[in-house]
Image (cartoon, rainbow, N blue to C red):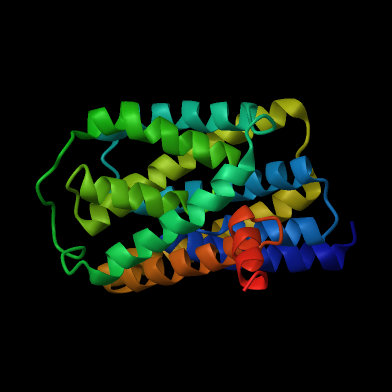
Amino acid sequence: MSFDIIGMLAVVAFCAGFFDAIAGGGGLITLPALFLAGLEPISAIATNKFQAASATVSATITFARKGMIEWRQSRWLAACCFVGGASGALLVSSVDKRYLEVCVPVMLILVAVYFAFSPKLAVGDSRKRISLLVFSFTVAPVLGFYDGVFGPGVGSFFIVGFILLCGLGMMRAMSFTKLANASCNLGALAIFMTKGVVVWPLAIAMALAAFIGAQLGARAAVKVGPRLIKPMLIVVCCALAIKLLSMETNPLRIIVLHAFASL
């Protein structure tokens, strides 16, 4: 692979890392770029997971330096997310992604609508429905599995889960989400590395760029707070939904086109 292509993909990874640190969704920026560069699907997914892990670990480090990671309360969360991500990567070839391609855009739109019309996302902790420990052993592995198999929007789903189910305020939900997302990525990456499908020169270049982008994005999120996070989440969720719905292989898109054609 030529140096100019590696350089362009590194720039893409930098932008993806910045946005992913704030609202998630970096995978739908980098993964199509890797496909366009000519990588085999499994190599593209594995290489993308390496740079995504670098970005999420970078963002987690920034939040930790600001004293926003509650390590004692989140150790089981990290462990369960790691197992979920590894399980998803292990079974990535056996899961029919058509179901995800139909459900995920709808879920992302619902998340965007929720964030757009809820006036209480910027306040502190609210009434919790389940404890963080229960969330760690029930919801977290499912989202981790989804991240290992597919991935787009998992950060947004974690944030909504922490807010609605655990009653966390926006910034606490963000800090737990960064750690959870990093654990999912590391779990999936561990499986991909054992399979030897990571394209290392490209992965390292993109990882360095994503690390820097995520540092800047996380600092922007911490500095500006919910004023930046809330609109970014709405924009990213809508953009991801539109991107997924626009894919030619998306069953929901095919159904809609057939319905219009029959009119």
The reply, left or right, for residue 159 in relation to residue 119 is right
When asked about the image quadrant of residue 250, the answer is: bottom right
* Residue at position x 70%, y 55% in the image: 249
Q: Is residue 246 visible?
A: no
When asked about the image quadrant of residue 235, the answer is: bottom left
The reply, left or right, for residue 202 in relation to residue 85 is right
The reply, left or right, for residue 101 in relation to residue 133 is right
* Residue at position x 59%, y 65% in the image: 256
Residue 262 or residue 42, whichever sits in front: 262
Q: Position of residue 197 (x, y in %)?
A: 78, 36
Q: Position of residue 116 (x, y in %)?
A: 29, 71
Q: Is residue 150 visible?
A: yes
Q: Residue furthest right?
A: 2
Query: Does residue 135 sit above or below 27 in this rendering?
Result: above
Q: Residue furthest left?
A: 127
Residue 42 or residue 14, whichever sits in front: 42
Quarter the C terminus occupies: bottom right
Residue 66 or residue 210, whichever sits in front: 210
* Residue at position x 47%, y 42% in the image: 182
